[in-house]
């Protein structure tokens, strides 16, 4: 079965949106097979965000992801990678479509890193890589 690594990022946890994110995943009919509230580490994030290591927003992104606990989960279902990206909405929360998680709950909070509530794997290859990073 296809799976995706989903994170409720520290902003989502702080704002009390864990339940809302899980509700949408379950309402869509996907299955949760792993679920854990945890603190990321710099090493874990270096692996998770390896593709962004050279980007100007990398350090602020890591600091943001270390700013509080995250909820990591493995979500399973037919075409779930694409399906969860669709539930999440566009990366930029100001323009993410209403009806999506980022569109309904996200917005710009000023300069700094984009805070957009959730992460979802962007391909099945990324999903397998990320599930290994977070859950071994
Ligand atoms: N400040 C800033 N942050 C960015 C920018 N692009 C991406 N980010 C941050 O880096 C994260 C990872 O970027 P991407 O992987 O391209 O975006 P994404 O796949 O929609 O988001 P994730 O699900 O978190 O991976 C984003 O979710 C943002 O928090 C940018 O241009 N500027
Ligand atoms: Mg990404």
Image (cartoon, rainbow, N blue to C red):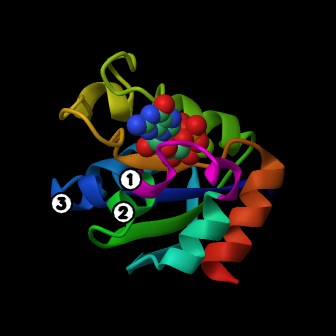
Q: State how far apart marks 1 and 2 are (Cα).
A: 5 Å
User: Of 114 and 8, which appears nearest the observer?
Assistant: 114
The label on residue 60 is 1
Residue 40 falls in image quadrant: bottom left
Residues tagged 1 and 2 counted as in contact (Cβ below 8 A): yes
Q: Is residue 65 above or below residue 20?
A: below
For disc 1, does the CB lie below 8 Å from ligand 1?
Answer: yes
Location of residue 7 in the rendering, given as x and y in whole percent from the top left corner: 47, 59
Judged left or right of residue 64, residue 57 is right
- Point 36% across, 49% down: residue: 21
Q: Residues within 10 Å of mark 2 (few under 14, many from 20)?
A: some
Residue named by callout 3: 14
Judged left or right of residue 35, residue 113 is left
Pair 2/3: label in front? 2
Q: Quadrant of ligand 2?
A: top right
- Point 60% across, 68% down: residue: 46
Pair 3/1: label in front? 1
Q: Is residue 36 above or below residue 67?
A: below
Residues tagged 2 and 3 counted as in contact (Cβ below 8 A): no
User: What span is colored magenta in the figure?
Assistant: 50-60
Q: In the image, is residue 57 part of the stretch drawn in magenta?
A: yes
Nearest to N terminus: mark 3 or mark 1: 3
Q: State how far apart marks 2 and 3 are (Cα).
A: 15 Å
Location of residue 72 in the rendering, given as x and y in whole percent from the top left corner: 48, 68
Q: Residues within 10 Å of mark 3 (few under 14, many from 20)?
A: some
Q: Mark yes or no: residue 29 visible.
A: no
Location of residue 120 in the rendering, given as x and y in whole percent from the top left corner: 57, 47
Residues tagged 3 and 1 counted as in contact (Cβ below 8 A): no
């Amino acid at each position: 079965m296809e799976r995706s690594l989903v994170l409720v990022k520290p902003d989502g946890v702080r704002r009390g949106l864990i339940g809302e994110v899980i509700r949408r995943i379950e309402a869509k009919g996907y299955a949760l097979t792993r679920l854990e509230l945890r603190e990321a580490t710099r090493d874990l994030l270096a692996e998770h965000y390896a593709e962004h290591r050279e980007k100007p927003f990398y350090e602020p992104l890591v600091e943001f992801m270390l700013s509080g606990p995250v909820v990591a989960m493995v979500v399973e279902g037919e075409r779930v990678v694409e399906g969860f990206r669709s539930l999440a909405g566009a990366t930029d929360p100001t323009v993410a479509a209403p009806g999506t998680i980022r569109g309904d709950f996200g917005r710009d909070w000023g300069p700094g890193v984009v805070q957009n509530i959730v992460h979802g794997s962007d391909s099945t290859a990324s999903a397998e890589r990320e599930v290994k990073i977070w859950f071994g």
